[in-house]
Image (cartoon, rainbow, N blue to C red):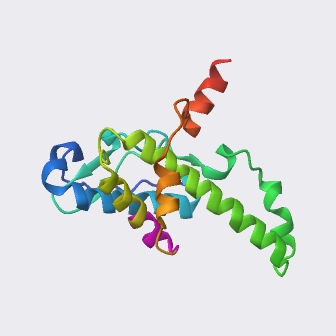
């Protein structure tokens, strides 16, 4: 087996320098990148940092993706959890259960990103609602309700993101 690496130079700067003039565009494109990662089954630790993103004035890019991990395994799912679904693809119940789990995982991922972006990308309720709406639209979900927006943007005082939770477990 031979391994190859193809690179394309991406011109741009840290997106934080464009937040005053291009916040809406960056919010929408960031949500689209998050959806793409979710649909591919990946999680990018530190996704909420702008360290691994560049913006060229029109397009936001995620660069340096070597830290990407399996989204499902991070939520405690093993390949055996998909066994029933794969062995009998006509089993609608197994597919429905998988899709429900998927929606939960994607929603938790979105909530974690919103939590971490509260002081940078989405500091206002309007910014948060735009991020959520962009995420829902790109993933193909119905327009978010006010109750869904409230659920995704309300955090208890002791809220832990998945990344923080895993970090605490690793320290023990």
**Residue at far top of view:** 172
Q: Position of residue 110 (x, y in %)?
A: 50, 53
Q: Nearer the viewer, residue 8 or 114?
A: 114
Write the residue at 50% across / 70% down: 139
Report if residue 159 is visible in the image.
yes
Magenta stretch in the rendered image:
134-141
Q: Majority secondary structure of the magenta segment?
A: helix
Q: Nearer the viewer, residue 153 or 131?
A: 153
19 left or right, relative to 35: left
Q: Position of residue 9 (x, y in %)?
A: 24, 54
Q: Quadrant of residue 22?
A: bottom left
User: In the displayed structure, would residue 102 be above or below residue 163?
Assistant: below
User: In the displayed structure, would residue 132 be above or below residue 51?
Assistant: below
Write the residue at 39% across / 66% down: 134
Q: Quadrant of the N terminus?
A: bottom right
User: Residue 31: within the magenta?
Assistant: no
117 left or right, relative to 154: left
Q: Position of residue 157 (x, y in %)?
A: 52, 31
User: In the displayed structure, would residue 126 be above or below residue 159?
Assistant: below
Write the residue at 24% across / 60% down: 24
């Amino acid at each position: 087996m031979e391994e190859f690496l193809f690179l394309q130079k991406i011109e741009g700067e840290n997106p934080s320098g464009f937040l005053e003039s291009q916040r809406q565009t960056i919010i929408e494109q960031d949500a689209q990148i998050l959806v793409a990662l979710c649909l591919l089954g990946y999680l990018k630790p530190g996704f909420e940092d702008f360290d691994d993103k560049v913006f060229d004035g029109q397009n936001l890019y995620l660069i340096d993706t070597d830290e990407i991990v399996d989204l499902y395994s991070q939520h405690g799912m093993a390949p055996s959890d998909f066994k029933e679904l794969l062995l009998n693809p006509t089993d609608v119940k197994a597919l429905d259960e998988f899709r429900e789990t998927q929606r939960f995982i994607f929603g938790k991922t979105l909530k974690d990103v919103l939590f971490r972006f509260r002081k940078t990308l989405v500091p206002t309720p309007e910014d948060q609602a735009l991020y959520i709406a962009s995420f829902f639209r790109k993933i193909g979900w119905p327009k978010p309700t006010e109750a869904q927006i409230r659920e995704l943007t309300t955090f208890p005082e002791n809220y832990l993101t998945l990344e923080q939770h895993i970090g605490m477990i690793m320290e023990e």
